[in-house]
Amino acid sequence: MKSRRKGSGPFIPWSALAPYLWLLLFFGAPLAIVLKISLAAPVMGQPPYTPLFEATKDGIEWLINWDNYLLLLDDPLYIAALLNSLKIAGISTLIALLIGYPMAYAIARAPESRRGILMMLVILPFWTSFLIRVYAWMSILSTTGLLNSFLLWLGVIDAPLEIIYTTFAIHLGIVYSYLPFMVLPLVATLSRMDMTLLEAAADLGAKPWQAFLRVTLPLSLPGILAGSLLVFIPATGEFVIPDLLGGPDALMIGKIMWTEFFSNRDWPVASALTVALLVLLVGPMIALQSARKRDANAETPQARGEAA
Amino acid sequence: MSAPNRPISPLYLVLAFGYAFLYAPIVLLIFYSFNESRLVTVWAGFSTKWYGELLRNEQILNAAWLSLRIAFVTACVSTVLGTLAGFAIARYKRFPTRGAFLGLLSAPLVMPEVVLGLSLLLLFVALDSAIGWPSGRGATTVTIAHITFCLAFVTVIVQAKLASFDRSLEEAAMDLGAKPWKVFCVITLPLIAPALAAGWLLSFTLSLDDLVVASFTSGPGASTLPMVIYSSVRLGVSPQINALATIMISVVALFVLLSGWLIFRQDKARRG
């Protein structure tokens, strides 16, 4: 078996070399540099931080500066921003799940001939510009926007509501932007489900809602997990949505990083914040990775062909 | 499953609401791009004047041209690199540091953009002061940054295609004496071409759309289209941006519908 022998070897395959080097240089190395600069002190000049070590005649002298991390712990602003990001991302993920699950269920149970077009309709907004879609909500939610004008015209309200620049607007923006990420993995797991299980449950006397709670829901947990993580992880570090739809007091870590970097030009603190964000997200990222792996193993080639 | 429509009908209502939520903002945006008035909420009659103003806006046109060039190079390079990586993962189940390679490939998919952007900028600055390259930041550094996260997406697509790939054709070619690179070029590559096309289009779109990573890794004088849109949008709603958005959405929708139709036709031909 020639192909089996080729499957493993003592060397890195030639085809992996170029992408491997690229990712080490432009993804691995930058993260190492972030870690390094988070341990430096800010100075005026270019680059605006101190070196990590200095070569002296006695060897190498390390100049590690923990001040940035101490500042993160000391200033309640940063802790609050980190916690608030997790909270906003968590609540948005939950809302996206509550909207996305029924949609995914309906798509997965639709006749197979229609499933393709229904899926495409979910994916289509994802292909259009993210910035433009967030911008679209600005004109709907603003105080002189479409929603307020409509409600005023209906007579439901007397004065415009403050919808934009609130936490609610951030939630709405995140749910709207990331909904396809929730729906797609759910459709994949739900359409792979063996429908005879539901028939068996019905034959054994389960009511439809019982069958749903005890058969469908547990079986779709991998999809729920994957979809939720795909929404939660990017939402935690989100910058555009809190910046455009949230108020000036919208405390989210992505926005604070941006401000520290561009407005305050404090690169070491921005780096320390980046490291803190990564530490927070490394758990969810590993969970997503293992969920993907489990999903890929469970997937038969035939089912994959149908889902695609 | 031949379950009749009866249990499905309330679900179609759910779908209708879901799709309304997804599409209403986009439809409203398109609608108001033809509004005569500068105000969003006041309909003052049909007009295409914002499109005319858009086409005379040098700053936006320059930024669009820059973004298109960056997206084109990004899509080409990341398709090549991503295909190589996808091939390595799908075909070589064991090699030293394969786990680390997988990690490097999947982390950019979920890494928050602010982290990617900031870390790449710090790398470019450090490289610049160490070896004098890249001197300053601009289109080149943005392109490198975009390739870094796009190549991971291409890898996922190519790898999935190769996983469901019937290798008997390759084996037949090999048995007939074709050399490995010839098998790859004549058999493998044409068979996975749809995945390459999908990966190329996805990279192109992601690059064209990116604001955060580009803002970090770009320099003075190299503002991409999203950067110009962002600085304009921060000041509030603008009818010119509505017109621009409408053009962008139409182009994307056309592309997606076209590729959807091609896939549909291919499927039909295959099923006979």
Image: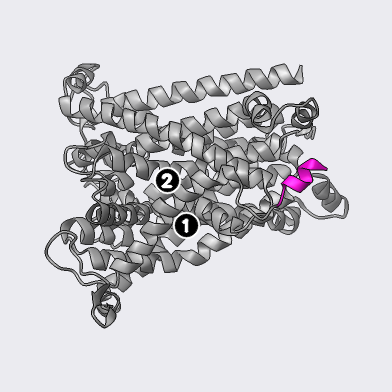
Q: Is residue A180 left or right of residue B266?
A: left
Mark 1 neighbour class, 10 Å CA radius: few under 14, some 14 to 19, many 20 or more: many
* Residues at marks 2 and 1 on the same chain: no
Q: What chain does mark 1 sit on?
A: A
Tag 1 secondary structure: helix
Image location of residue A11, percent across then percent down? 63, 53
Whether residue B26 is visible, yes or no, is no
Closest to the observer: A79 or A18? Answer: A18
Determine whether label 2 and label 1 are within 8 Å by CB. Answer: no
Q: Residue at x 55, y 31 (%)?
A: B196
Q: Residue at x 34, y 39 (%)?
A: B143
Q: What chain does mark 2 sit on?
A: B
* Residue A160 on the magenta span: no
Tag 2 secondary structure: helix
Image location of residue A272, percent across then percent down? 31, 69
Classify the position of the N terminus of chain B by image quarter: top right
Image location of residue A75, percent across then percent down? 24, 76
> Which quadrant would residue B43 be assigned to in this image?
top left
Q: In 3D space, how far apart are the residues under numbered discs 2 and 1 (Cα atoms)? A: 22 Å
Number of the label disc, if any, that sits on residue A232: 1
Mark 2 neighbour class, 10 Å CA radius: few under 14, some 14 to 19, many 20 or more: many
Q: Is residue B46 left or right of residue A98?
A: left
Classify the position of the C terminus of chain B by image quarter: top right
Q: Is residue B117 above or below residue B147?
A: below
Q: Please name the amino acid that badge 2 sits on.
A: Thr
Image location of residue B120, percent across then percent down? 33, 52
Residues drawn in magenta: A1-8
**Where does label 2 land, which residue?**
B148
Q: Residue at x 54, y 48 (%)?
A: A182
Q: Is residue B247 above or below residue A234?
A: above
